[in-house]
Amino acid sequence: MTFKLTIAAIVLMAVVSATCASNDRPASSASGTTASAASGSAGKSDYEKAIKAAMDAKNKAASVDSEWRDTGKLISQAEQAAAKGDYAAATKLANKAKMQGENGYAQGMAQKDAGPRF
């Protein structure tokens, strides 16, 4: 029995680490960004779409009291980068903020009934 649990734990750790590693990759077209945003040549229109999506995701997470700590900071950093004309960096930051907003919402929904059980 212990052997089976050990194997199961190893498989689980491998899956989790592979999933975490995939989150560090640049965003692809499947996640809603354009190919130009993933390649680093994002323009103003790409940034505007990304920042709107990030704000929407942030507000959705806040609606279930599960906004992550850095989401607003990332949006501010994206706005500052866009003000300097660095739309590639701004789009990347906005996409990261969007991901945090979506994950915050998912976490809030998953834990909405969490609490002590007596």
Image (cartoon, grey):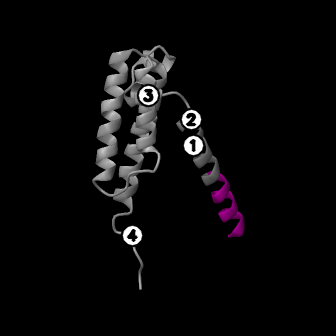
Please name the residue that numbered disc 4 is placed on: 114
Residue 28 in sight: no
Helix, strand or loop at mark 4: loop
Asked if labels 2 and 3 touch by Cβ distance under 8 angstroms, the answer is no
The earlier-in-sequence mark between 3 and 1 is 1
Please name the residue that numbered disc 2 is placed on: 24
Question: Disc 1 versus disc 4: distance between alpha carbons?
Answer: 24 Å
The kind of residue tagged 4 is Ala
The kind of residue tagged 1 is Cys
The kind of residue tagged 3 is Gln
Question: Disc 3 versus disc 2: distance between alpha carbons?
Answer: 23 Å
Please name the residue that numbered disc 1 is placed on: 20
Question: Disc 4 versus disc 2: distance between alpha carbons?
Answer: 29 Å
State the extent of the magenta-drawn residues as a range: 1-11
Dot 3 surroundings within 10 Å: few (below 14), some, or many (20 or more)?
Answer: some
Helix, strand or loop at mark 2: loop
The earlier-in-sequence mark between 3 and 4 is 3
Q: Position of residue 53 (x, y in %)?
A: 32, 33
Whether 27 is drawn above or below 85: the answer is below
Whether 111 is drawn above or below 79: the answer is below
**Quadrant of the snapshot with the N terminus:** bottom right
Asked if labels 1 and 2 touch by Cβ distance under 8 angstroms, the answer is yes
Residue 3, located in which quarter of the rendered image?
Answer: bottom right
Question: Which label lies toward us, 3 or 4?
Answer: 3
